[in-house]
Amino acid sequence: MGLLARAKVIPYNAQVELSDLNATDYPQWRTGHEAAVALADCVAVATQGDEAGKVVVEIWYGELQLDDPAIREPVFEAGRYHLRVFTSPVGAPPARVYFLLSS
C-alpha cells in the first residue's frame, strides 16, 4: 500500500504519538532515555525538542520506501498491528518519525 499519511507536527515535550482514537491512557517514560514507549493502543516516540521546530511524521503500510540508507533498524517493534518505528536522523534527536504497519 505504501504511504498512508504524512504530517508536520509540533512535538509535545519532545515526543509524538500514534494512538487509537479511543485510547484513554498514555505510556509512561521510565528513564527518559527510551527511544519509544507503548501501551496496547498508544506509542510515544522521543523526538527533537519542541524548540527545534516541527517533526515530520509518516505512517506507512506494507513496505517502508525511503531514500535514507542510514535508517536500517527500528527503534521500536511490537503490537497486534505489527508496528515498527523508525527515526531520522540516526544518532541525533529525531526530526522524522516513520510508523510502519504490516500484516
Image (spheres, rainbow, N blue to C red):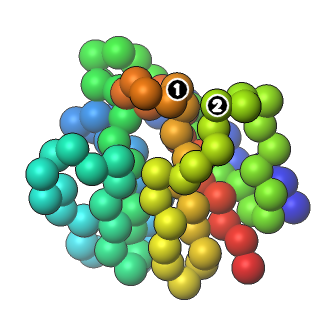
Residue at the farthest bottom position: 80
Choose top left, top right, bottom left or bottom right for residue 6: top right
Number of labelled discs?
A: 2
Choose top left, top right, bottom left or bottom right for residue 11: top left
**Residue 7 seen from this side:** no
- As displayed, is residue 40 above or below residue 21? below
Q: Position of residue 22 (x, y in %)?
A: 40, 77
Badge 1: how crowded within 10 Å, few (<14), some, or many (20+)? some
Left or right: residue 40 versus residue 24 is right
- As displayed, is residue 80 above or below residue 91? below
Badge 2: how crowded within 10 Å, few (<14), some, or many (20+)? few
> What residue do we see at 43% from left, 27% from top?
91
Q: Position of residue 94 (x, y in %)?
A: 44, 30
Left or right: residue 26 versus residue 45 is left
Amino acid bearing label 2? Ala
Q: Secondary structure at mark 1?
A: loop
Residue at the farthest top position: 52
Which badge, 2 or 1, is on the more N-terminal residue? 2
**Res 20 label:** none
Left or right: residue 8 versus residue 69 is left
> What residue do we see at 35% from left, 15% from top?
52
- From mark 2 to mark 1, how far is it between C-alphas? 8 Å
**Res 89 label:** 1
Q: Which residue is mark 2?
A: 70
Q: Quadrant of the N terminus?
A: bottom right
Q: Position of residue 81 (x, y in %)?
A: 60, 78
Foreground residue, 103 or 73? 73
Q: Position of residue 101 (x, y in %)?
A: 66, 66
> What residue do we see at 25% from left, 65% from top?
26
